[in-house]
Amino acid sequence: MRLSKLRGNGLVLGTVFDDVDEYYERHIDRTSTAFRVDVGRETLVPGTSWPGTRWIKAAFPEPSGIDVNMMPFRFFDAKDTLPESLHGYLPLIASCPVAAVDFGPDGSAKEWRSNRVAYLTVQESHVGAGKTQRRPGLHIDRPGAIVDGGRYVKAQEWGNNEYTALQWGGGCCTREGVAIDGIYLASTVAGSTRVFDSLVVAPGDVTDAHGGVEHMRERLGGAGVDLPADQLHWITDRTPHEALPMASDGDRQFFRLVVGRVSVWYAAHSTANPLCEPDAPIVHGSKFAT
């Protein structure tokens, strides 16, 4: 049916748009913790040992043109499971307050995982004025669907006996303010990332296949928070965020660590690590295939 047939029928149109607004409103959580700013902890200098170990506040290393995406490694054995070219990021990795406990879908502690796999993204590049280094447009990092063999697979079809939804790090905050799983990120340029203090509920129902939520921008409320530089921040994979254009030409370093459950690892879009295999199901081929 064409919407033009409803022209002049304000009652019907009003009811339709009220239903749409109500539908989207049910998919926004404004009460749970969506992000935390400056969560980094002081860390031991990697490679040192007692006595004489000194504590430092983690910071970005000197850039060297690194560009890796979702590289798997063992978080609590990072030095031995990351290529040496990434060892400059060991202090920043160690400053992420990641627990060795694995949590179930209800947030309860399940299993001690000192060998848990995390996924590292580092991008060091020159970015032109008005350009974004990372993905523009409002989105969450949890995908709305998995592309496997050129077809979109609904969450319910993706074989997993423990979770009913796709995840890309998950993330939640306890009543005591302790972050569980989720995504840690930082950059060297202030105001180049914006996050919103809301969570998308049941994202598979309202996002596009890649987590896009641009159509929900006006419903989120507020203008969002522009993140400062050289600080470690925590978000969930349901926290709306976006990369912002650079105010001027310059170099930018971006760091992201995904520490929760990952439903899929796309080999074509991720960086393999000869020292560690992903613990997520591997899909070959483009995630943008239709």
Image (cartoon, grey):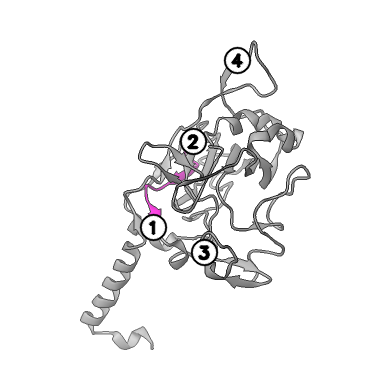
The disc at residue 217 is 1
User: Looking at this view, is 250 or 84 the one in front?
Assistant: 84
Mark 3 nearby-residue class (10 Å; few <14, some 14–19, many ≥20): many
Tell me which numbered mark, 1 or 2, is placed earlier along the sequence: 2
Is residue 194 covered in magenta?
yes
Q: Secondary structure at mark 3?
A: loop
Q: Is residue 290 above or below residue 223?
A: below
User: Which amino acid type corresponds to the residue marked 4 in the rendered image?
Assistant: Arg
1 and 2 marks in contact (CB < 8 Å): no
Instruction: Give me the disc on residue 190.
Output: 2
Structural distance between the alpha carbons of marks 3 and 2: 29 Å
Dot 1 and dot 3 residues touching (CB under 8 Å): no
Image point (72%, 49%), residue name: 277
Q: Quadrant of the N terminus?
A: bottom left
Horizontal side, residue 183 vs residue 76: left or right? left
- Going by the numbered disc 3, the residue's amino acid type is Gly
Give the foreground label among 3 and 2: 3
Sequence-wise, the earlier of marks 2 and 4 is 4
The residue range painted magenta reads: 190-200
Local SS, label 2: loop
Looking at this view, is 216 or 184 the one in front? 184
Residue extending furthest toward the left: 11
Task: Estimate how packed mark 4 is, as few (under 14), some (14 to 19) or many (20 or more) residues with alpha carbons within 10 Å.
Answer: few
For disc 3, the marked residue is 144
Whether residue 82 is visible to the viewer of this picture, yes or no, is: no
Q: Tell me the CA gap for discs 2 and 4.
A: 29 Å
Q: Residue 54, which numbered label?
A: 4
Whole-number angstrom distance, CA of label 3 to CA of label 4: 44 Å
Q: For this view, does 83 lie left or right of residue 233? A: right
